[in-house]
Every structure is written in structure tokens, then in C-alpha cells.
Image (cartoon, helix red, strand yellow):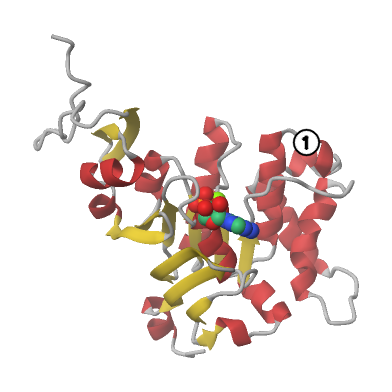
Amino acid sequence: MNSNPNITSVESLLSVTGLSVHLGSRTLVTGVDLAVRRGEILGLIGPNGAGKSTVLKAVAQLLPYRGAMQLAGHQLSRLSARERARRVAYLNQDDQVQWPITVAELVALGRYPHRSAWGGVPDAEDRAAVEAAMHSADVWSLRARRADQLSGGERARARLARVLAVQAPLVLADEPVAALDPRHQLEVMALLRGHCADGGAAIVVLHDLTLASRFCDRLLLLDRGEPAATGPVDAVLVPANLRAVYGIDAVTGLHAGQRYIVPWSLEPDAIHPPDRKTGHGANVKPPY
Ligand code: ADP
Ligand code: MG
């Protein structure tokens, strides 16, 4: 790793080139390049089945893949499982908790990569990390509850707390807000931003285009296993891409300098493009 903080701060924490994932004769993902710097959230968007989870699993080294991945100057595939688990925290999309353990015990699992190879008991640092993660994800009051008996949204926050407890520089989060109420959606996105403000980075799979626009620095739009667009948010979330990839038109506008994007219509041309001056999109065409 580069020891000069000025250099590491502008270098990519993670860079992926030429990623493809094949399963038997099927190609799930191909031609994916991505990079994420410290301080950045990269949003991974695209329709169901586009390959978002596959990309994240490949980065988490959970699937065989072709291509090169560098994490802070290390070849990711060469790191030991323990090293990797300290540096990359992965929140999968599957929303189940398999065991009858408490929320506190679930979150404490995030500290396992920090234990010695012989196990050992949690030290003060582990306990502080678990406590801080439970407060951040707003599950402190649930800490004694059984994790497999929570509501979908509570469980999602408990699972996120486990990922935060790792204190890994890179967080990979697959649809972390899918089950959450609006307030918790905003809280989770703010949390991920906070992780990045502290020098971390995140790749986050999202379906909510407004959250993608407001909270991500750059986006990778996947379509049928291939990148359809990548770059700054405003360059990716343009009407032509929404039509071509999702087959929708959206109402869009600006509020407090930030863009909102509301999927509106299955029919192309139903919505006028945003007004150049106000940034507001017109509603659907009047029926006359
Ligand atoms: P997304 O997360 O964007 O919804 P996925 O990455 O889960 O999409 O899946 C991408 C494609 O790969 C889909 O067509 C899906 O059906 C297929 N796929 C994913 N996992 C498997 C698997 N284990 N076996 C066969 N096909 C799979
Ligand atoms: Mg998925």
C-alpha cells in the first residue's frame, strides 16, 4: 500500500477491469470496468436480472470471475480471506438471518475478521465497534431481540450494523434500503455517506433513482449483464438511458439543488424533458 496519504486519497481504493462472470455456458456479466475512490459512493443500478448482485458478489470474491481487481494496490484475489474480510464488508441481498441469535450477537459477527486465527474473546475495541454500529444503524433498542424474529426493515438494519461493525474501508451493499421505511432509507444513505466522509468508500445497489442521484457520486448502469452507461450521476440518469434500459419515462426536478427522479410512465414521449431554466419536468401530457 502507498504510505503517502496524499496519494492514496486520490487513488482508487478499488479498481476492476474487464470483469466477466460465466456460469457454464451462460454469461451473467461481461465488460465491466469500475473504480471507486475513498470518499466516494458508486451506485450500481439497472433492471432486475441486469447483473448488479453478480458484480458485487464477484468483488466480494464469492464467485469465480475473469478480470483484474485491485484493492488499495493489492490484487484482491491474492489477499487471505481474513485480510479481505477486514477490508471489504459485504451486505448481501438475501434478507434472511439463519440462526436464532440476538441482534447484538449478529452484529458482533462483523468483528470476527479482527480476531486472531485462534479465536479469542472480543476486546474493548471490538465492543466499541459493535456498539457504535448498532447506534448508527438504529438497532440499539433491538440488541436483545432475536434477529430471526424481526420485521423485514428491522432485520435489514441489523444486517447493516453487522457490516458497519467490520469497519472495513470498502462497503459493498446490495439493495440496503429495499425493505426500509422512508426515514430509515434516508438514514441508511446518510450513514453510507458518513462512512465515505470518514475515508471509506462504498458500492451500493439501488433501485430508487432519486436516492441514486442524491447520494451517489457516480453510477454504473447495467443492462443485461453489460454496462449501458457509467460516469457522473447527471450523465447517467438522462431520459434516453431510462428509456433504453428501463423502458420508462420519469418526472424529474430540482429541490434544494438536488435532483429527484420519479418513475412515471411506461410510454415513451409521455413526459416533456425538464425545463432548462427551472430543471422541473412537466407532468404527463394532458389528455387533449
Ligand atoms: P440483479 O442483481 O441485477 O437483479 P443478478 O446479478 O442477481 O441480477 O443476476 C443476473 C443474471 O444472472 C440473471 O439473469 C439471473 O437469473 C442470473 N443468475 C444469477 N445467479 C444465477 C445462478 N446461480 N444460476 C443461474 N443464473 C443465475
Ligand atoms: Mg440483485
Q: Nearer the viewer, residue 112 or 144?
A: 112
User: Seen from this angle, which residue lies furthest top?
Assistant: 288
Q: Residue at x 49, y 90 (%)?
A: 3
Q: Nearer the viewer, residue 69 or 163?
A: 69
Q: Residue at x 75, y 43 (%)?
A: 140
Q: Which secondary structure, mark 1?
A: loop
- Above or below — where is 281 with respect to 29? above
Query: According to the image, label 1 marks what residue?
Result: 150
Quarter of the rendering occupied by the C terminus: top left
Image coordinates for residue 151, horizontal then vertical, percent: 73, 33
Q: In the picture, residue 249 is in which quadrant?
A: top left
Identify which amino acid the numbered label 1 is placed on: Leu
- Above or below — where is 213 with respect to 33? above
Image coordinates for residue 80, horizontal then vertical, percent: 69, 84
Image coordinates for residue 206, horizontal then vertical, percent: 47, 47
Q: Residue at x 81, y 47 (%)?
A: 103
Q: Residue at x 36, y 77 (%)?
A: 10
Tell me, yes or no, if residue 99 can be seen here.
yes
Number of marks drawn: 1
Q: Is residue 87 left or right of residue 52?
A: right
